[in-house]
Structures are given as C-alpha cells and as structure tokens.
Image: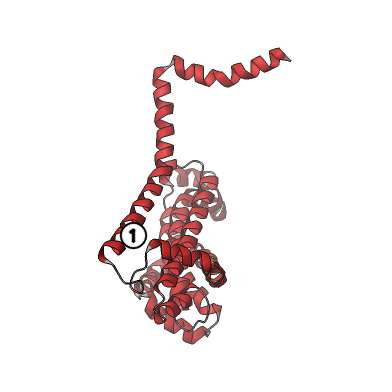
Amino acid sequence: MASDVGMVHTAAASPARAAAADPARAAWLAAQRWARWKRRLLPLLGAASLLFAWWALVAFFQVKPFIAPAPQVVAATLWQKSDILLANLWPTAIEALSGFLIGNLVAVAVATLFVHRKGIEMAFFPIVVLINSIPVVAKAPILVLLLGNGMAPKIAIAAVICFFPTLVNMVRGLEAVSPQSLELMHVLSARTWEVFIRLRLPTSIPYLFSALKIAASTAVVGAIVGEWIGSQEGIGALIIQATYNFDSALLYATVICGSAFSVAFFLAIRMLERICVRWAPQSQS
C-alpha cells in the first residue's frame, strides 16, 4: 500500500518535475496560467471600473434619481422586484429562443438551396438584402398587423432578424470547400447529398456558429422590439411601462435583466461551439 501511494505521488509530481527540469516548459505553463487568469479577471475589472465611473458621475454631478439612478439603487431594485423581472423575462426568452430556432433553420435551408441552385440565388438574394435593409422598427408594425398581438409577431421579428446573418455565413461556409476536395468527390462518383453531408456541411459548421453567436444577441433584441408594439408582458413591455412611469431604477434593472439573458444565450452558443467544433482554433471562439 505504501508503495502504491508513493507511485501516485510520483506520478502527480512528474509534470512539476518535468517543468522544473525544462525552464522553457515552465515559462510556457506560467504564460498559459496567466493568460487564463487574464481572460477571467479583465472582464471583471472592466465591469467594476464602469460601475465605479457610473457611481462617481451620479454622485459628483448629483444627477436626479429619475434621470440616472446610482448603481446601488438599481441593484436594490433588481433584488426587490426580481419576481416582476423574471415573470416578464420568461415570455421574452420563449420568443427569442423560438425565433432563433425558426430563423436559423430557415436560413440554413435557404442557404443550401442557394448553393445548389445558383439561378434561384441570383433571383432572390437581392430581395433578401432588400428586406434586411428595412429597419426592425418598421417591420414590427407590419408583422403585428399580419399576426396579431400574441407571441407570433414577436417570434417572427426575432426570426427575421436572425435570418440574414445566418444565411450569408452559411452560404459562404457551404461554398468554402476546396476545389481539390470537390474534384476528389466527383472522381469517387459521390452523389450531391453525399458531397453535402460529408464535405460541405462539416466545412460550414464554423461559419454557422459565427452566425449563431450573432443571432443569439439579435434574437433577444428582436423579441424586445416586438414587445414594444402591442404587448402587455415581456421585457420590452416592462421597459415601456417603466419609461412612462419615470421609474428609472426599474428601467435600468429591466435593461440589465434583458442584457444578462442575451449574454447567457451567447455564452451557451459559445460553449456548444467548443463542443462541436473541436478542430477550429480556440482563439476563434
């Protein structure tokens, strides 16, 4: 038993001994540890500095609370009205997630069609660009008139705002296959669907995740904008109510709540990317 324990300690200490024996490796390990700590600490320091600047400006200029409340007031509102904030966050989350899924699935399908049917791409891609150039605040009333005042128009707005970035990135990814690989597949008499599954789709995955990370934030924005028009619940509706009531603390707390959900959604997509795209450099994520 004592020998087994000694072997465990020796195995555990071997990396440290190897690093001590090799100064270059020890320096490299130290640099990696410092880089990891920087990635964790710098965002925290940046947030802390912004909060301090916010508090200092409000205190120095004696800004009225209904214009810009102090950070501690917003934090107290987040705690005291957490039930109201969470109750309104839930429908916004459903609308954003549903629009995210629908918009991206349709974008992937349309991108696949465009890549395999160039005539259709040349005919309809300019129309897609034209529709995307219309501001979201102009699309929202049209969709509300067409779909009513329920969740449907909010989901549609979130889907529309996610559609274009994913379409562009997916088309680029599907076309990023090397000519040599395509030629090899043709030599092997591969069918179109085999080329798509085995070659085009794996090549497009990093491009797809780049678009999904953008869509994760824009879907939340689309759902909130949709709630500004004809909605009685949700983060967007709560923002309007707090603005009309001059409740700036609740307004700031609502914005922070929506932003926190957007960041969490983005981080979830980023984590999924690290699981699925293991061959891509980590710096790209």
Query: On the rendered structure, is 66 left or right of 162?
Result: left
Question: Residue 159: image x %, image y %?
Answer: 49, 70
Where is residue 218 drawn, in percent x and y?
Answer: 43, 65
Judged from the image, the secondary structure of the residue bearing numbered disc 1 is helix
**Who is closer to the viewer here, 135 or 165?**
135
Q: Residue at x 58, y 21 (%)?
A: 12
In the depicted view, which residue is nearer to us: 88 or 129?
A: 88
Q: Amino acid at mark 1?
A: Trp
Horizontal arrangement in the rendering, residue 134 relative to residue 151 (left or right): left
Q: Does residue 76 show up?
A: yes
At x 56% / y 55%, what residue is drawn?
193
Could you say which is closer to the camera, residue 17 or residue 208? 17
Location of residue 93 with respect to 185 vertically, above or below = below
Residue drawn 57% across the image and 69% down it: 83
Q: What percent of the width, then of the height, locates residue 188?
A: 54, 44
Please determine whether, in this image, residue 215 is positioned above or below residue 33.
below
In the drawing, does residue 23 fall left or right of residue 197? Answer: left
Q: Residue furthest right?
A: 1
* Mark 1, residue position: 55
Residue at 44% over, 72% down: 250
Rendering quarter of residue 53: bottom left
